Structures are given as C-alpha cells and as structure tokens.
Amino acid sequence: MNKHEDTILAMIAGYVDTVGFIALFGLFTAHVTGNFVLLGAEVAGVGQGALLKLLAFPSFIVGIALGSVIFKFTERHQSPNAASVLYLLQAALLVSFLVTGMLITPAMGSDASMVLLCGVLGTMGMGVQNARGKLLQVSGLPNTVMTGNVTQIVLDVIELIHRGAAGGHGQQVSERLKWTLAAMCGFAAGAILGALAYMQFSFVAIALPVAVLLALAWNRRAAPASH
C-alpha cells in the first residue's frame, strides 16, 4: 500500500463515518470504539440508539473476519488479485449500506430492524478497511482513527524543532510528518464532504466512496498481495 492510498482511505473513513453519524443516530462506523462512549451516554439517559451502537462492535469484528477469510482464500488461489479483493468486498458492503439506507429514508426509529441492518453493514465495511493493512502486511498509517496520527504529528514537530530536519533522521521524520498530515487532512476533508453530500443526496452520497474503492480495486488488480 502506498502513502497516497493511506490518504484516500482516510478520506473514505472520514466520509463514511460522518454519513453514519448523521444518518444513524450518532453511530460511528469507522471509529467503532467511539460507540462505547455514546453507549455510556445512552445508559445515563442522554442519548438514543443503544442497540444500534451495541451491535457495532460485533459487526466490526465480523467485517474483519470476513475480510480475512476472503483475502486468505483469494491469496491461496489467485494471489495477484488478493490485494484488490478487499476493496471489492468493502465496496460491496457499502453498496448494501447505501441500499438499506435508502430503504430507511425517511428515518425510522433507531431500533427498527432495517436501521440496525444498515448500521451493521456500514460497520462491517469499515471493519474490512481496518483489517486491510494488517492482512497485506504493510506498514501504512492508521487511516480510520486519527488519534494516533495526531500524536505522531506532535511528536515529529517537536523532534524537528529539537534536532532539525538535516541528515537522514531529520529527512525521515519530515517525510513521515508530511504523509501523516496528509492522512489527517484527508480524514477531515472526507468528514466535511460526507456531511455536505449526505445533506444534499441522503444515502446516495455513499456512491462516491464506492466508486473510489472500485477505482482502487482496478488499480491494484494485478499488484502483489504484499510488498
């Protein structure tokens, strides 16, 4: 996975996460652990959609497991396409997310069965994205949760101030800072675009990340599974 893919995937994560949050009663599809905070708020009586958020974690796990099984099967039988199959799987899950989302518009209650299914499919799709880097055994940046990236940005800025950008170490830190900033900005841009697109097009907005995933799958169709 190259660094440009990290930025693109971060944009997708921010986009889908924001659509899910707006449309599905505050559900995080990518930053899945954030649902525990919201679940705690709902237990205290200041939120809604407890069951939806409770289902997010097992759905995320199923997405990771499904991605792993399909990737390993493809790698074993048709290795050149193993890298692109995860993009296709995520795209298929997001298409299902889009379709079920359209079926629940106008919005039903947070515990309606179709709303729950919609949330499950979206979270599964982002589970596949989370698993991608580890399955491909590449050292890309985290592209679904930005907390670690923000930490790394601050550490790298302090390091450059302290030791400067000259020399091999300084160049390495500068390069890492550049790509980490790109991923973080990509996530932020995706979140803004996702919000605007959802307000304009409702769940049809999910067609954009699906198209991007299909383009990535096409671009990676003959690439090695890891490098």
Image (cartoon, rainbow, N blue to C red):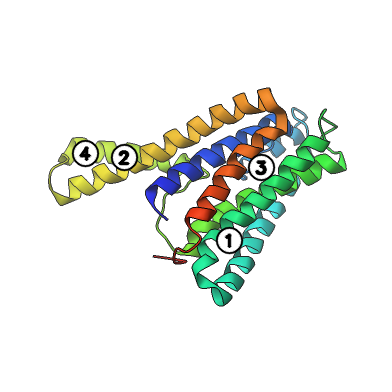
Q: Earlier in the sequence, mark 4 or mark 3?
A: 3
Identity, as a three-letter code, of the amino acid under mark 4: Leu
Q: Earlier in the sequence, mark 2 or mark 3?
A: 3
Q: Earlier in the sequence, mark 1 or mark 4?
A: 1
For this view, does 23 lie left or right of residue 103? Answer: left
For this view, does 120 lie left or right of residue 216? Answer: right
* Few, some or many residues within 10 Å of mark 2 (<14, 14–19, 20+): few
Q: Secondary structure at mark 4?
A: helix
Is disc 3 in contact with disc 1, using a CB cutoff of under 8 Å?
no
Q: CA distance from mark 2 to mark 1?
A: 29 Å
Identify the residue at horizontal 68%, vertical 52% (top origin): 92
* Few, some or many residues within 10 Å of mark 1 (<14, 14–19, 20+): many
Q: Which residue position is annotated with label 4?
A: 160
Q: Which residue position is annotated with label 2?
A: 178
Q: Earlier in the sequence, mark 3 or mark 1?
A: 3
Query: Which residue is situated farthest in the left direction here?
Result: 167
Q: Which residue position is annotated with label 1?
A: 85
Q: CA distance from mark 3 to mark 1?
A: 30 Å
